[in-house]
């Protein structure tokens, strides 16, 4: 897997420290590093990306080689220290891996980290394959250490989650990095305006030098045309390079510019590429970074080349590229006929599988308890990023807003200030609470908000693969540590009413919501019940056909995939049912028995 290759490559480069926050498509990098740890590596899931980046910086200050992992939206959280760290620099090699998610497949946004590279003025490496990711991460450490700067490493989903057989170094060839340790020097490590001014001058000089160096860097290359006289060409990068090369397996293929370091841009290589061209098509994900750079270079060097791509609408402006879309773009550009598709049998129609909470997920019970308690009352339910975002689906329909991690706590407060007659709820998961919701709770207490904070505590980071967090009592180094109590944190910041209840005890949960939400000020409910994937299920529920009237309340109120329709009547899908007992508590005719909480 691409992510595994990146981790193996970083270890081969002498990695000492890796920290990060889980987020698809980056998660497996850190997890592979942890599994491959021979005891010489420190591995940490940090509480958020900002903490991870700052820890990695501290290690790099000591001469350690550090890697920080996150997905593209996580870089937004880490951007504050990133911008300043670009000015301070590092001593040991430091690679900040930011996995972009064109599509998006599992993200809120389609943001392009290459913009962050130019914005922060940091070198950026953009691998195109699993093998190149393994090799390039090692080179990225070398560049980082040589130029004493953190560097960005930007794989995308199809590189991160692609699989390939690759060649790796023998462990005897791995670099061994012995950190010197932290050497005090306030003129180096303490950021002041004067230091930043001088650092800015140095950064601009360094990046001008790197533009020349990257023009000679072997992973930036020109693939020559297969026949002479072709004055059209293609410029591309990353996984799109593999799609381009697949589309150009013909004798009249044009030349190709492969850009592996989008910043600083390999300007001299680009000039060489452009000098005998009439038109160039830029194929890239996500934004027209290469297209704009080539347009600028044509103007700077007065090259009469027409640059085409997203800005000219020759390539779609959103979404990920595919072999088919790239082939169509290039064929239209070159004036080729599209290849006919080989006749294929139509695949069978797949069943519709909308994203839903798992059967037995305690979040379903939590949402339902709040929904029942607030019937007939003007209420707003602000959601967050995680499995519980799926609470927006019908029939629950319990997520009115969702922006980014931790935002729901503060959005709730904003709505409450404008609509004081509204019962305002903010839902957040246990991992997200530690990552980015604590400050929102402090803000609510300090600014006298009237809201109910609902923490959905399922004892894991479920959405990204069940990683530990401060509330689980274990670390990625295998240590068993004291759990950080969500309840005590809330009380510590001034939330006076904090109640904990098992949402699968439905009557108690509903009563708790009614009682707590009726209070004024900031109050909190912790719905505590483990993720259904982590526990051994009980016996599946059973529907008594003699009592069942076919009212479908169990289906129409819960939307649990463990309850299906068979022969026009509700039935239990025993392969999915975990025996949580929620449906038995909802049925008005006591027709559902069995399950953990059933009578």
Image: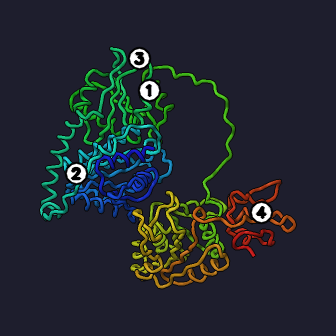
Per the image, label 2 sits on a secondary structure element best described as loop
**Residue that numbered label 1 is attached to:** 330
The mark nearer the N terminus, 2 or 3, is 2
Tell which of 588 and 335 is nearer to you.
588
Task: Say few, some or many: other residues with alpha carbon within 10 Å of mark 4 (under 14 / 14 to 19 / 20 or more).
Answer: some
Which x, y percent locates residue 289?
33, 40
Task: Say which residue label 4 marks.
Answer: 552
Q: Is residue 195 visible?
A: yes
Q: How many numbered circles are shown?
A: 4
> In the displayed structure, would residue 171 be above or below residue 76?
above
Occupied quadrant, residue 220: top left
Q: Is residue 519 above or below residue 120?
A: below
Q: Earlier in the sequence, mark 1 or mark 3?
A: 3
Tag 4 and tag 3, C-beta contact below 8 Å: no
Give the distance between the C-alpha atoms of the residues marked 4 and 3, in whole angstroms. 63 Å
Q: Is residue 217 above or below residue 453?
A: above
> Secondary structure beneath disc 1?
helix
Local secondary structure at mark 4: loop
Of the two numbered discs 2 and 3 in the rendering, the one whose residue sits closer to the viewer: 2
- Where is residue 17? Give x, y as percent: 31, 57
Query: Which sits earlier in the primary sequence, circle 4 or circle 3?
Result: 3
Residue 149 tag number: 2
Q: Nearer the viewer, residue 539 or 520?
A: 539
Q: Work out whether residue 46 or residue 368 is closer to the camera in this orientation and state it.
A: 46
Q: Name the residue beneath numbered marker 3.
A: 252
Q: CA distance from mark 1 to mark 4?
A: 53 Å
């Amino acid at each position: 897997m691409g992510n595994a290759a990146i981790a193996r490559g970083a270890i081969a480069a002498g990695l000492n420290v890796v920290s990060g926050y889980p987020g698809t498509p980056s998660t497996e990098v850190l997890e592979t590093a942890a599994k491959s740890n021979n005891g010489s590596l420190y591995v940490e899931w940090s509480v958020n990306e900002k903490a991870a980046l700052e820890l990695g910086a501290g290690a790099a200050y000591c001469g350690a080689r550090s890697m920080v992992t996150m997905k593209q939206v996580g870089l937004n959280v880490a951007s504050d220290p990133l911008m300043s760290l670009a000015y301070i620099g590092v001593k040991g090699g430091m690679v900040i891996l930011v996995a972009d998610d064109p599509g998006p497949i599992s993200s809120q946004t389609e943001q392009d980290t290459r913009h962050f590279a130019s914005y922060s003025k940091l070198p950026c490496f953009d691998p195109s394959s699993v093998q190149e990711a393994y090799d390039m991460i090692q080179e990225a450490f070398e560049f980082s250490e040589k130029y004493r700067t953190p560097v960005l490493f930007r794989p995308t989903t199809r590189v991160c989650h692609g699989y390939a057989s690759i060649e790796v170094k023998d462990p005897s060839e791995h670099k061994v990095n012995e950190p010197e340790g932290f050497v005090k020097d306030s003129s180096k490590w303490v950021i002041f305006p004067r230091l930043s001014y001088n650092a800015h001058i140095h950064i601009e000089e360094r990046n001008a030098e790197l533009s020349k160096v990257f023009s000679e860097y072997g992973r930036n290359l020109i693939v020559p045309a297969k026949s002479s006289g072709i004055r059209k060409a293609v410029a591309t990068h990353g996984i799109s390079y593999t799609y381009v090369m697949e589309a150009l397996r013909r004798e009249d293929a044009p030349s190709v510019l492969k850009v592996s370091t989008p910043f600083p841009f390999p300007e001299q290589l680009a000039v060489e590429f452009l000098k005998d061209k009439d038109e160039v098509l830029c194929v890239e994900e996500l934004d027209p970074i290469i297209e704009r750079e080539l347009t600028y270079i044509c103007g700077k060097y007065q090259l009469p080349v027409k640059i085409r791509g997203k800005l000219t609408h020759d390539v779609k402006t959103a979404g990920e590229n595919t072999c088919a879309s790239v082939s169509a773009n290039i064929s239209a550009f070159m004036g080729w006929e599209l290849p006919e598709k080989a006749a294929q049998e139509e695949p069978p129609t797949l069943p519709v599988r909308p994203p839903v909470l798992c059967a037995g997920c305690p979040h379903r019970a939590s949402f339902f308890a709040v929904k029942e308690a607030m019937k007939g009352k003007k209420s707003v339910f602000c959601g967050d990023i995680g499995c519980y975002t799926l609470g927006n689906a019908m029939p629950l329909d319990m997520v009115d807003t969702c922006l980014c991690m931790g935002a729901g706590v503060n959005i709730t407060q904003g709505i409450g200030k404008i609509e004081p007659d509204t019962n305002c709820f903010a839902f957040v998961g246990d991992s997200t609470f530690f990552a980015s919701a604590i400050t929102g709770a402090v803000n609510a207490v300090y600014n006298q908000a009237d809201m109910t904070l609902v923490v959905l505590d399922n004892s894991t980071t479920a959405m990204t693969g069940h990683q530990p967090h401060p509330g689980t009592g274990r670390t990625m180094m295998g240590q068993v540590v004291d759990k950080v109590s969500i309840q005590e944190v809330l009380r510590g910041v001034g939330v006076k009413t904090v109640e904990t209840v098992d949402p699968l005890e439905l009557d108690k949960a509903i009563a708790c919501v009614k009682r707590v939400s009726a209070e004024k000020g900031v109050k909190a409910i912790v719905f505590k019940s483990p993720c259904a994937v982590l526990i051994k299920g009980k016996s599946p529920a059973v529907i008594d056909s003699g009592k069942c009237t076919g009212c479908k309340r169990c289906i129409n109120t819960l939307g649990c995939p463990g309850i299906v329709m068979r022969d026009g009547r509700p039935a239990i899908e025993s392969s999915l049912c975990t025996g949580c007992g929620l449906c038995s508590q909802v049925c008005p005719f006591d027709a559902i028995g069995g399950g953990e909480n059933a009578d």
